[in-house]
């Protein structure tokens, strides 16, 4: 990991629409219908900037976008934030980039006034590494909704106090 030189940027570009599509698809973790949602949020960020309510951090290695996070303020809360997306290209998984990106996301959200950030994921067995990732990074499992996504696939809600 130390040999990788990471570059962070926060302003989405039109090229990031395809970068995000490639990253999300490469993971193999998301349903086909979820991919356009990730792409749409980036497109909104490109078109509207901060007015979209979506904030991004992109990670580049040698000029290639390899990971990103999308987060924002939860309407109706004074300082709650959602972590809408965090994904690292499958070719870079296990390199530590996700942890560094998550820490940077926490830092930026806190600078924006966040007291806590919520992350949601699936209860399916294939998402165990995702759940462990959140737990290893200081998130606590605060809620579970059975059969949320479909029968047998519940939603696990994690909270990180900042």
Image: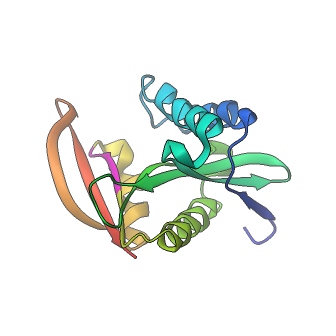
In the foreground, 3 or 44: 44
In the foreground, 141 or 108: 108
Residue 113 location in percent, x, y? 44, 71
Furthest residue toward right: 62
Residue 92 location in percent, x, y? 67, 51
Residue 21 location in percent, x, y? 61, 31
Q: Residue at x 41, y 71 (%)?
A: 136
Q: Is residue 48 left or right of residue 76?
A: right
Q: Look at the picture and state if 156 lies above or below 17.
A: below
Quarter of image, res 118 = bottom left
Is 37 in the magenta? no
Total tally of numbered discs in the picture: 0
Predominant secondary structure, magenta span: strand
The C terminus, quarter of image = bottom left
Q: Look at the picture and state if 140 lies above or below 73.
A: below
Q: Residue at x 37, y 47 (%)?
A: 127
Q: Residue at x 34, y 54 (%)?
A: 74
Residue 18 location in percent, x, y? 68, 30
Is 122 in the magenta? yes
Q: Residue at x 60, y 58 (%)?
A: 94
State how the image is colored.
rainbow
Magenta span of residues: 119-123
């Amino acid at each position: 990991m130390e040999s990788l030189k990471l570059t962070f940027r926060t302003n989405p570009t039109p090229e990031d629409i395809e970068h995000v599509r490639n990253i999300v698809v490469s993971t193999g973790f998301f349903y086909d219908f979820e991919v356009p949602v990730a792409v749409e949020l980036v497109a909104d960020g490109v078109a509207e900037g901060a007015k979209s309510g979506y904030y991004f951090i992109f990670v580049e290695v040698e000029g290639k976008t390899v990971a990103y996070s999308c987060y924002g303020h939860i309407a109706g809360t004074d300082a709650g934030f959602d972590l809408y997306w965090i994904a690292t290209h499958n070719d870079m998984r296990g390199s530590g980039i996700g942890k560094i990106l998550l820490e940077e996301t926490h830092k930026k959200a806190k600078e924006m006034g966040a007291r806590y950030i919520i992350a949601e994921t699936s209860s399916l067995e294939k998402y165990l590494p995702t759940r462990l990732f959140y737990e290893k990074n200081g998130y606590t499992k605060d809620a579970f909704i059975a059969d949320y996504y479909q029968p047998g696939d519940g939603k696990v809600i994690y909270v990180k106090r900042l």
